[in-house]
């Protein structure tokens, strides 16, 4: 059974062993409430420690300073170390090369790299280029002239429209559609809509991950671009002509309208909505369910609909629960004012 000692784990994660025997073998990674003998678990909070103490976990992965009464690998960046720990145990390079399934279609003009896997039902169009060690799962469609970079994985039922460019080490999850037509129509004289041809493409940088059932529309003329290192969750819509920077995070159900510019390392939380032709600055953060109608400066955070500065939105939200009491008090004040006004009018008549 695959296992690592605490010392080996610490060495791989750039940490150190504390309060334990470096040669202690570890066989798996489990959450604190489920960890047992032979398991290591992540502990970053006191609640994690309490859960850990109720189990038989062999060891913990934790930051310095958190008191834990069992063998521990200490690290400076626990979440990053945890990701590497999972890679160590469960993502070893065991990729088998099966080649091109005879039930797949590969056009004669397509170019395939080394050690490519193309599963049954996949389609690779004329002039398409598939890089080295690429995996195309069943029913993947790669259109004419599209390019998929080295070491990329396209899971089942991904559609890559003609001319789309995917960089190296991409992970495109099931149902994602890259390069569908942008939503462009011109109103006609009788109220009808005339389709504006979308003749551009989609370009993805390196190390991009696209979630299940996410759509990225092709540009009208040039390219809809997703920068290197960007991570896009499930059920996200990216409109035509959008430019997304490097290392951007876009969370589920967000919608980005056409021609939006999103700077490097920006974050869009769940169900954020952006109108067209605005700019989200570098490092900006958009809160969940925010409706953004104007530019967001670099390094700032916004929330609400229409989106305003996060600090202002939080102050406004803090008043919502008090509105019934404010309404009651306002009504009392109005009634008092009415009585005083009536009394004042009565005195004036007496005078």
Image: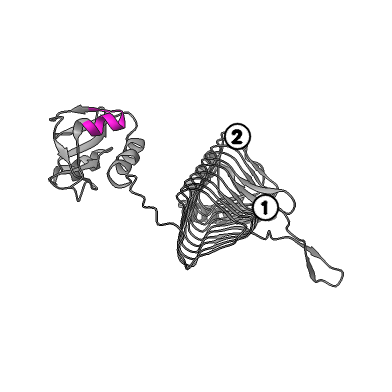
Magenta stretch, main secondary structure, is: helix
Q: Residue at x 19, y 33 (%)?
A: 6
Q: Residue 67: in sight, yes or no?
A: no
Image coloring type: one colour
- Camera-near label (2 vs 1) is 1
Alpha carbon separation for disc pair 2 and 1: 28 Å
Residue 77 vs 261, above or below: the answer is above
Q: Position of residue 179 (x, y in %)?
A: 63, 57
Q: Which of marks 1 and 2 precedes in the sequence? A: 1
| Left-right relation of 1 to 332 | left
Element type at marker 1? strand
Say which residue label 2 marks: 298
Is residue 34 shown left or right of residue 160?
left
| Residue 41 visible here | yes
Q: Residues within 10 Å of mark 1 (few under 14, many from 20)?
A: many
Give residue 34's position: percent from left, percent from top. 19, 51
Q: Residue at x 31, y 28 (%)?
A: 14
Query: Of helix, strand and loop, which one carries label 2?
Result: loop
When the figure is inspected, residue 7 is found, relative to residue 201, above or below; the finding is above
Which residue in the protein does label 1 denote?
201
Question: In which quadrant of the rendered view does residue 21 lie?
Answer: top left
- Give whichever of 307, 247 is nearer the camera: 247
Q: Position of residue 249 (x, y in %)?
A: 51, 44
Give the number of marks.
2
The answer to whether residue 113 is magenta is no
Mark linked to residue 218: none
Residue 261 location in percent, x, y?
65, 43
Q: Confirm or deny contact between disc 2 and disc 1 (CB under 8 A).
A: no
Q: Which residues are magenta?
A: 8-16
Residue positioned 47% across, 46% down in the render: 151
Q: Residues within 10 Å of mark 2 (few under 14, many from 20)?
A: some
Instruction: Name the one closer to the observer, 263 or 166.
Output: 166
């Amino acid at each position: 059974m695959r296992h690592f000692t605490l010392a080996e784990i610490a060495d791989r994660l750039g940490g150190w062993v504390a309060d334990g025997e470096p040669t202690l073998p570890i066989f798996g990674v489990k959450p604190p409430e489920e960890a047992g003998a032979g398991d290591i678990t992540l502990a970053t909070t006191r609640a994690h420690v309490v859960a850990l103490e109720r189990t038989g976990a062999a060891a913990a992965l934790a930051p310095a300073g958190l008191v834990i009464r069992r063998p521990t690998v200490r690290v400076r960046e626990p979440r990053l170390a945890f990701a590497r720990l999972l890679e160590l145990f469960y993502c070893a390079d065991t990729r088998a090369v099966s080649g091109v399934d005879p039930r797949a279609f590969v056009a004669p003009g397509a170019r395939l790299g080394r050690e490519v896997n193309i599963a049954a039902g996949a389609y690779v169009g004329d002039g398409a280029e598939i890089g080295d060690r690429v995996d195309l799962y069943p029913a993947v469609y790669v259109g004419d002239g599209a390019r998929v970079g080295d070491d990329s994985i396209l899971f089942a039922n991904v559609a890559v429209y003609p001319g789309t460019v995917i960089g190296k080490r991409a992970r495109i999850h099931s149902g994602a559609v890259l390069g569908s037509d942008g939503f462009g129509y011109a109103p006609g004289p009788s109220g009808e809509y005339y389709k504006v041809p979308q003749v551009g493409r989609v370009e993805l940088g390196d190390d991009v991950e696209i979630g299940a059932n996410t759509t990225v529309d092709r540009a009208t003329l040039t390219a809809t671009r997703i920068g290197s290192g960007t991570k896009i969750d499930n059920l996200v819509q990216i409109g035509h002509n959008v430019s997304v920077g490097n290392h951007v995070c876009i969370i589920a159900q967000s919608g980005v309208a056409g021609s939006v510019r999103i700077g490097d390392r920006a974050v869009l939380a769940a169900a954020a909505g952006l109108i067209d032709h605005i700019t989200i600055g570098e490092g900006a953060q958009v809160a969940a369910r925010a409706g953004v109608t104007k530019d967001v400066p670099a390094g700032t955070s916004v929330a609400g609909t229409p989106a305003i500065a996060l600090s202002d939105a939080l102050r406004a939200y803090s008043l919502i629960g008090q509105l019934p009491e404010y309404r009651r008090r306002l009504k009392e004040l109005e009634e008092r004012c009415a009585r005083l006004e009536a009394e004042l009018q009565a005195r004036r008549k007496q005078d």
